[in-house]
Amino acid sequence: MLDAQSEAGQPLRPCFTLAGVRRGIIEILPVAAFLIPFGIAFGVAASAKGVGAEVSLLMSMTVYAGAAQFAVLDLWYAPLPLVTIALTVLAVNARHLLLGAALAPWLLQIPLGRRLAALLLLSDANFAYAMSARDRGEIDAGILFGSGIAMWVIWIAGTVVGAFAGALLGDLSRFGFDAVMVTYFAAIVVGQWKGRPDLVPWIAAAVVALVGSHLLPAGWHVIAGALAGGLVGAWRHG
Amino acid sequence: MAEQGVAIGAVLLMTLVTVATRFSGVWIMSFVAITPRIEAFLKYLAVSVLISIVVPATLNASPRIWLAVAAAAIVMATTRSALGAMLVGAALAAAVRNFTTL
């Protein structure tokens, strides 16, 4: 397996290899496994709203964005409000723009086709994973695509179970699944702490996001908080 | 069935919008020179996205999620294992749910 360091100890240039894809699949699997109950929850919620199993399955395969998929369920009535659906998906997924921008210094150094592959299955969780891997010296953007594939397959599998058999499973919070993603993201955040200079930008992000979560339409507090943290960081340390 | 056709069209529309959000961040940055200031912005942007998800999702949830996240943060700070932190946090959330009234 290729190492992230050359023999002289210098970091190599960013790349995208099959070995990286494989590594991404394997390393995200323990986290991705916990996506199953969320996929099930989506399948259950969709069928409860009268969305056909084949439509919710198609949605998980092609959209593959949990928060947006849950958000549109409230809009799933006849005739379908297509403009409202599109704007809602844009609002909830606009944070992908920021994830992509944050990955730009890395991904702009690899060829276009592979860059798009790395971005195709981007989500909060594989972004969090890739960011902490990058921090450890990972240069292979294949891990983004690999971790995306693993999570995508599991999201689809969960949706299938939920859409066809969800009603039999009951309330899943008794297993603590509802705490999985927030604890994983919290751990990644703690791992990113580099010392005192981080304090003010982090507080700016947290405060703006928290206030925004009570004032802004669904999803926008993440964008507001992320921009606040980024701007304060650039202002103090740029 | 016409209704089914519209539903599939709506899903494809959602897909187009979502893929556009995934591709456009890097595309927009390809027109921006990455100066030290922009680099600092992107570095803090990256962690701030996750902070902005975690902090409201935790504080706006029940005390059992507060406990789970606090435990995960402590495990991460001491062991540097995000996976271990997640497992401890989720196990604690499950235990609190099943054995207390929180």
Image: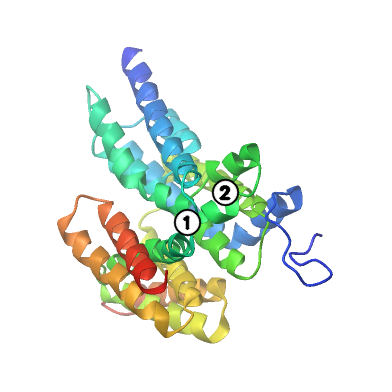
The disc numbered 1 marks a residue on which chain? A
Dot 2 lies on which element? helix
Query: Is A72 in front, or is A38?
Result: A72
Q: In which quarter of the image is residue A105?
A: bottom right
How far apart are the alpha carbons under marks 2 and 1?
A: 17 Å
The disc numbered 2 marks a residue on which chain? A
Query: Is A31 in front, or is A218?
Result: A218
Can you say which quadrant of the picture contains the C terminus of chain A?
bottom left
Residue ID at (27%, 39%): A88
Mark 1 or mark 2, which is nearer the start of the sequence?
1
10 Å crowding of disc 1: few (<14), some (14-19), many (20+): many
Residue ID at (34%, 66%): A229
Can you say which quadrant of the picture contains the N terminus of chain A?
bottom right
What's under tag 2, amino acid-wise? Answer: Gly
Residue A128 position, x and y percent, is 50, 61
Is A8 situated above or below A44?
Answer: below
Residue ID at (33%, 32%): A51
Q: Nearer the viewer, mark 2 or mark 1?
A: 1
Residue pointed to by mark 1? A102
Asked whether, in this view, residue A214 is left or right of residue A68, the answer is left
Dot 1 lies on which element? helix
Is A225 situated above or below A59?
Answer: below
Residue pointed to by mark 2? A148
Q: Quadrant of residue A54?
A: top left
Q: In which quarter of the image is residue A138?
A: bottom right
Q: Is residue A168 visible in this depiction of the protein?
A: no
Asked whether, in this view, residue B91 is left or right of residue B80, the answer is left
Judged from this view, the residue extending furthest toward the top is: B1
Figure disc tally: 2
What's under tag 1, amino acid-wise? Answer: Ala
